[in-house]
Image (cartoon, rainbow, N blue to C red):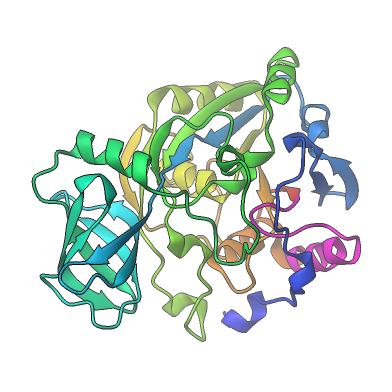
Amino acid sequence: MKTADFYYDLPDEAIAQTPIEPRDAARLLDTRDMSDHRFSDVPAMLDPGDLLVVNRTKVRAARLHGTKAGTGGAVEILLLARRGDGSWDALVRPARRIRAGLAIAFSGGLEAIVTEAPAQGRCVVEFPGVSEPELDDLIEEIGDVPLPPYIHSPLENPDRYQTVFADEVGSAAAPTAGLHFSQSLLTEIEERGIGFRHVDLQVGLDTFRPISTDEIEDHQIHSEQVTVPEETCEAIASVRRAGGRVVAVGTTVVRSLESAADAQGRMRAFEGPTDLFIRPGYGFRAIDGLITNFHVPGSTLVVLLAAVLGERWKPAYESALERGYRFLSFGDAMYAAVERQ
């Protein structure tokens, strides 16, 4: 399949620069009949006994501003993910003249050592003499929450780039479909008899990057750390037996749940990395529907949506643009039912 088939024209003015208030006032396109709704209509669009699954990951304050030892030159480090040995994969800017062994000083007495020189802006850093709990606290104290590169307006309230159910710190980016939920909406969902469970997937910046190969089969998708708890698996099995729907809130939840399902669709608790690349023709085993934002052209997320909707994904996007929907992280959302093969 050609990567070009998953592009669409996205005008700059369609990219939402600020989140709408209140959270659940965002628009919601129901792709089953192409009807317009508000996100606050979600409880009415689902039935008692259905199950919503969200990603409760929390965005870390992963953007650190420091200076090079010796020269005092400014350096920006964006921490992506902790490696097994305690070091970090990171993006560094400017990457030019960054070499292995360079020390970078940050406020609070924190120092990083570059252990692998940058390749395409990526490097590996370690923080000697600091325990993981101490480092986590320092990062939250001195760092900034990173926004996607297409957001050019400052965010007055950093909490608006966190979901109301965020719990476990672990991501370089927000699971943006979850940003539309308010506490009052969660209460309404519960009162309607709709289940609510979670997974944890550590979102990385590769999520937003366009595919760089001509054919999507040649693209090496990023790997992300996932936890699907036993209680979530049990809830899905119960909903299945009762004939209810399992609706994923966001593409990160889709990848998490599908990674935890066996070939027969049975769910099992899962913890570990996933590099599952969901493409058109994929047979969904864990989910019946998806609530998601509108994604970057040519990204793996658009490819995943095409696997859900089939060829209807592009007309849905074009219609949303014509109707003035807001796109990307702070934009509006859509509901998509899985198109079974």
Q: Left or right: where does residue 198 sit relative to residue 336? A: left
Q: Left or right: where does residue 264 sit relative to residue 117? A: right
In the image, what residue occupies the spot 78% across and 57% down? 326
Q: Left or right: where does residue 208 sit relative to residue 74? A: right
- Say whether residue 230 is visible: yes
In the image, what residue occupies the spot 63% across and 67% down? 296
Q: 28 above or below 204?
A: above
- Can you give x and y, in whole percent of width and height, for residue 324 in the image? 88, 60
- Can you give x and y, in whole percent of width and height, for residue 162 in the image? 55, 39
Q: Give the range drawn in magenta.
A: 313-332
Q: Residue furthest bottom?
A: 214
Answer whether residue 317 is magenta in the image.
yes
The one of 226 and 126 positioned closer to us in this rendering:
126
Q: Which residue lies furthest to the top in this view?
A: 191
- Can you give x and y, in whole percent of width and height, for residue 146 in the image? 48, 54
Q: Quadrant of residue 115?
A: bottom left
